[in-house]
Amino acid sequence: MKKYHQLLIVGLGLVSFICFLIYKHEYDRLRLLVETLEVWGSPPVQPLAVAPMVDRQQLAPAPVGAEISNNQPLTNALLSSNDKS
């Protein structure tokens, strides 16, 4: 009878240990999730303002031969009007 009691105690110990390992694994996963949420924080209460749309023609470079202003033709970005070579 003593053997069965010891076997029962060892069996309960193994089941308890396995349950502890499962609990520890889930606890670590949840702790990591909470830490990640703390890093990112909560979403802002007010929505962020949206930047105005920019027209693509405003971003396009000026074509060769265009005038920057009066009497200043744009022919080459590397040469200025004072360079004479």
Image (spheres, grey):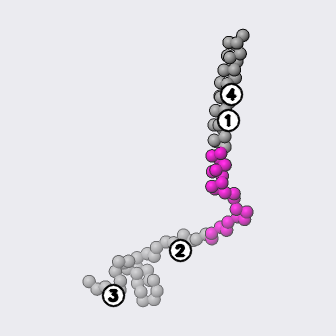
Q: Nearer the viewer, residue 42 or 49?
A: 42
**Residue lying farthest to the left in this orientation:** 85
The magenta span reads: 31-52
- Element at badge 2? helix
Closer to the N terminus: mark 2 or mark 1? 1
Amino acid carrying mark 3 in the image: Asn
Residue at left 35%, top 83%?
A: 80
Residue at left 45%, top 76%?
A: 62
Name the quadrant of the C terminus. bottom left
The numbered dot on residue 23 is: 1
The numbered dot on residue 69 is: none
**Residue lying farthest to the top in this orientation:** 1
Q: Residues within 10 Å of mark 3 (few under 14, many from 20)?
A: few
Q: Position of residue 50 (x, y in %)?
A: 65, 67
Q: Which residue is mark 3?
A: 82
Residue 14 figure quarter: top right
Name the quadrant of the N terminus. top right
Q: Position of residue 46 (x, y in %)?
A: 72, 65
| Badge 4 vs badge 1, beta-carbon distance below 8 Å | no
Amino acid carrying mark 1 in the image: Tyr
Between the residue at mark 2 and the residue at mark 1, the CA separation in whole angstroms equals: 60 Å
Between the residue at mark 3 and the residue at mark 4, the CA separation in whole angstroms equals: 88 Å
User: Does residue 39 lie above or below 11 as drawn?
Assistant: below
Between the residue at mark 3 and the residue at mark 2, the CA separation in whole angstroms equals: 28 Å
- Element at badge 4? helix
Mark 3 or mark 1: which is in front?
1
Q: Position of residue 4 (x, y in %)?
A: 70, 13
Residue 73 figure quarter: bottom left
